[in-house]
Amino acid sequence: MAIFTFEDQTTSPVAPATLYKALVKDADNIVPKAVDSFKSVEIVEGNGGVGTIKKISFLEDGETKFVLHKIEGIDEAKLGYSYSIVGGAALPDTAEKITIDSILSDGPNGGSVVKLSLKYHSKGDAPPNEDELKAGKAKSDALFKVIEAYLLANA
C-alpha cells in the first residue's frame, strides 16, 4: 500500500468555533438540514467518538448511495478533526481508505482558515486517478459552500 498526500487550504467568512461546531459536533443534524441530497446519518459502530463509523446516505443522480465515515481524531482545543472514508460511493476501487485531517484557525474579518491534508491510501502502489481526485474535490468544495451558506443564513 502506498500513501499519497495532498494539501489544501481555503477561507470562510464563518468564525472558526461556529464552523467547527457545525462540521464536527453538530454535523449529524446540520448537514441533512443544509444539504437537500443528504438523507440520513446513522452510527454503525461506536459511540460518536474516535473509532466511530457512520453511514451517511445521500441522493446522487436519482439514486440513494452511502459513504462510510470513520472518526480518526477529534481535537477540540485546536479545532482539529480527522476522519477516513472507509467504504461506499466516495471510495474508489483503488483505495483502501482516504483520510482527511482538518484544522480551523482564525481568518480574515472574523472568519476562518481551513487547512486540509488528504491522505490517499492506495491498494498496491498505483497513484490515485487524477479525474477521480478532481471530482471528489469539486464535490467536497460544493458541500462545504452549501454548509457555509446555511450557517450564514441561520446565524
Image (spheres, rainbow, N blue to C red):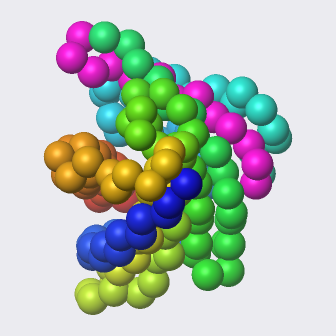
113 relative to 74 in the view: left or right: left
96 horizontally vs 34: left or right: right
Q: Residue at x 59, y 62 (%)?
A: 82
> What quarter of the picture does the C terminus occupy?
bottom left
Compare residues 19 and 136 and report the one nearer the observer: 136
Up-down relation of residue 36 to residue 62 (above or below): below
Residue placed farthest to the right in the image?
A: 47
- Residue for point 27% across, 21% down: 60
- Percent across and percent down for residue 110 are 34, 84
- Along the line of sight, which residue is nearer the eye, 83 or 26? 83
Residue range of the region highlighted in magenta in the rendering? 50-62
Q: Is residue 14 magenta?
A: no
Q: Is residue 25 left or right of residue 44?
A: left
Q: Which percent across, then down, holds residue 68?
A: 56, 33
The answer to which of 90 and 62 lies nearer the viewer is: 90
Residue depicted at 49% across the width and 69% down the height: 102
Quadrant including the N terminus = bottom right
- Could you tell me if residue 65 is visible in this image? yes
* Helix, strand or loop for the magenta stretch, by majority: strand
Q: Quadrant of residue 14?
A: bottom left
Relative to 54, 29 lies left or right: left
> Against 62, is 139 above or below?
below
